[in-house]
């Protein structure tokens, strides 16, 4: 028979077991499927890990696609030299829409951080580009 304090919430019962129900004498028993549940949890974690790995690889591939970033080793915007700053910025935005293009007067103070999603176009006093803009 069931008595008060015989349930799985008793303080003296091991906390690591999975208590499933009553046996023929009316006492709580550890489930036979405890090992099966642990195996199921392990396979769920493996599935989740695989999914997260696949997701991160997909995002990485998308972030480094050809249209997202210009090649960092080449001066990709040498054709801008001689154009107005705005014309150069429009040309870069058309070719690489994900880049943030900023037109800045030569000699203006700028931050020193290096960002692959940014292109700074430096213009002289007449508004013309004198050097090839680069990422960073």
Image (tube, rainbow, N blue to C red):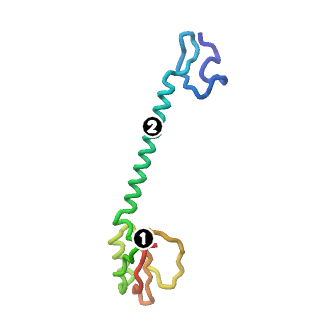
Residue to which mark 2 is pinned:
44
| Residue drawn at (41%, 71%) of the image | 72
Report the side of 22 relative to 55 (left or right).
right
Q: Label 1: which residue?
A: 100
For the residue labelled by badge 2, is the local secondary structure a helix, a strand or a loop?
helix
Q: Residues within 10 Å of mark 1 (few under 14, many from 20)?
A: some
> Where does residue 61 sit, x and y in percent of width and height?
38, 58
Name which residue lies at 59% across and 9% down: 1
Query: Contact, CB < 8 Å: mark 1 with mark 2?
Result: no
Image position of 64 with respect to 29: above or below? below
Up-down relation of residue 1 to residue 5 (above or below): above
Q: Nearer the viewer, residue 58 or 35?
A: 35
From the viewer's side, name the closer residue of 20 and 93: 20
Circle 1 — which element?
strand
Quadrant of res 48: top left
Instruction: Give the residue displayed 39% in from the left and 75% down from the top.
Output: 74
Q: Nearer the viewer, residue 54 or 20?
A: 54
In the shown orientation, is residue 8 left or right of residue 69?
A: right
Which quarter of the figure has residue 76? bottom left
């Amino acid at each position: 028979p069931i008595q008060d304090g015989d349930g799985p919430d008793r303080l003296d019962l091991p906390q690591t077991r999975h208590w499933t129900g009553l046996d023929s004498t009316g006492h709580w028993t550890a489930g036979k499927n405890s090992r099966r549940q642990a195996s199921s949890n392990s396979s769920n974690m493996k599935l989740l890990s695989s999914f997260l790995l696949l997701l991160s690889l997909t995002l990485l591939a998308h972030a480094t696609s050809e249209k997202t970033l210009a090649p960092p080793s080449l001066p990709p915007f040498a054709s801008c030299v001689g154009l107005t700053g705005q014309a150069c910025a429009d040309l870069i935005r058309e070719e690489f829409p994900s880049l943030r293009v900023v037109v800045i007067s030569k000699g203006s103070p700028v931050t020193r951080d290096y960002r692959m999603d940014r292109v700074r176009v430096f213009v002289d006093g007449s508004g013309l580009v004198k050097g090839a803009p680069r990422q960073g």
